Amino acid sequence: MKKALIFLIIAFLFIPLFVADARGNEVAQLQQEMSALRSQFSEMKMSYETRITQLETKIVDLQKTYSIRAEKPQIAPPVQPQTTSLGRYFQSFNPDVSVIGDFTYHATDSKNTEFRNQFQMRQTELAFSASVDPYARGDFFFHVEQEDGDWHIGLCEGYLTILTFPIDGLQAKAGKFKVEFGKANKLHLHNLPWVDYPNMITNYFGGEGMSEPGVSASYLIPNPWNKYIELTGQVVNNRNGASFAGSSGRDLVYLGHLKTFFDINEESTIEFGSSIVAGSNTESHGKFGKDMTALEGVDLTYKWRPLQKGLYKSLVFQNELLFSQKDRPYLDDGTDIVDGKLINSWGAYSSLEYQFAKRWTAFGRYDFAEFPDYSSRRDNAYSAGLTFAQSEYCFWRIQFKHTDRNYDKDENAVWLQCDFGLGPHRAHQY
């Protein structure tokens, strides 16, 4: 009896120890399994995040590269509006409306600037866009600007785009629009990656580039390599004042533009374009080789965006080169008038943008530009700046620019810029 009692006491004292040890082993095993599950979950999460980033990156690149082409509608008899569906009927009368403000402070040592060392609402853009019918789309862009103390509103662009033709890949446009010459000329102020246009654009096309009434047709060329190749032809008025006849022009300008885009790899792309435009630079109709201006240009853009961190890092290397031949009287050294002289001049710029964080981008740009009427006058400019994208509707920017001129005093300028937008038309590409 005593032996049994001693055995029970010993068992009572030591069995919990064995049970605790067994439970300890079980807990350790469960902890190992939980750690393994956490590791697998982390790997799966990282894999999905990487894949999502890749997809978002591809979407951003496609939005920046390709213009949206509407699907070709099926041929069918015209359909009258159905008044029974009031919401859909009245929706056709409500276009997308956007307002974009461009607010700046311009500090400069030049005395030729109207808003020297002052704040300025440099430009307000009003944008209206809507589908006209299943086959066409309309776009209008009005600019409100201050000049000589008064506010003026003017039509920057207003055109109808015909989206569908019997020929696949063909589109047409009629109205007033920015001509398809190079890259920078087609952009509005708020779309620029810098505060100002390159000197090449302002010297040869004017303060905000070349925008004229006319017609345009573009065609996606089928090719065995399945690459993006677009050919554009345009005919517009010759009223551009920098290279052509100005407001007194009564003739036309003819333009051709060829653009191709291809991938180097999954992270890098290259876009190459070539442009040519020619027309009369006098009030009367110019003759071939006389009283004519011809401009040729090439542009090359390299883009890099990593697959895993595409929202946080990217690089854009953009370059343009322009050659001009202008036949008309010009001032030689600012004194003597020489008749019948063909003026050869050229301009170029090279820009590098590097996004080092989700909302931060640093940039630098070099400009060289002569003038269509004065090949002996030239600008050399160096710019550097920083952009903070507050959101897809607002950004802040600071830029320093030094301009070296051989015909006037050099200039140093600092720009502070804030662009913000209301509505679907974004203040910048985000």
Image: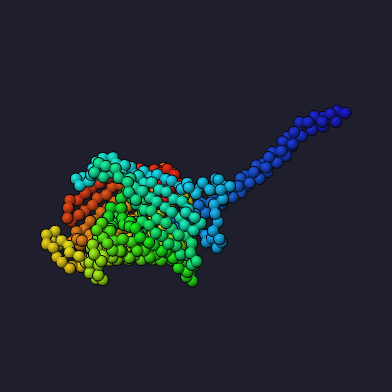
Q: Nearer the viewer, residue 141 or 352?
A: 141
The N terminus appears in which quarter of the rendering? top right
Q: Nearer the viewer, residue 401 or 13?
A: 401
Can you tell which quarter of the image residue 269 is in?
A: bottom left
The mark total stands at: 0
Residue 213 is situated, as x and y percent measured from the top left of the image, at: 34, 58
Vertical placement of residue 315 versus 120, above or below: below
Report if residue 213 is visible in the image: yes
Q: Is residue 88 left or right of residue 215?
A: right
Vertical placement of residue 428 versus 175, above or below: above
Residue 208 is situated, as x and y percent measured from the top left of the image, at: 30, 53
> Which colour assignment does the render follow?
rainbow
Residue 107 is situated, as x and y percent measured from the top left of the image, at: 25, 43
Q: Nearer the viewer, residue 176 or 340?
A: 176
Name the residue at 68% across, 43% down. Answer: 29
Farthest right residue in view: 1
Name the residue at 54% across, 58% down. Answer: 78
Name the residue at 45% across, 55% down. Answer: 137
Vertical placement of residue 275 versus 116, above or below: below
Can you tell which quarter of the image residue 35 is in?
A: top right
Can you tell which quarter of the image residue 301 is in?
A: bottom left
Name the residue at 24% across, 64% down. Answer: 284
Report if residue 317 is visible in the image: no
Residue 336 is situated, as x and y percent measured from the top left of the image, at: 11, 62
Vertical placement of residue 146 versus 404, above or below: above
Q: Is residue 192 left or right of residue 246?
A: right
Q: Nearer the viewer, residue 215 or 346?
A: 215
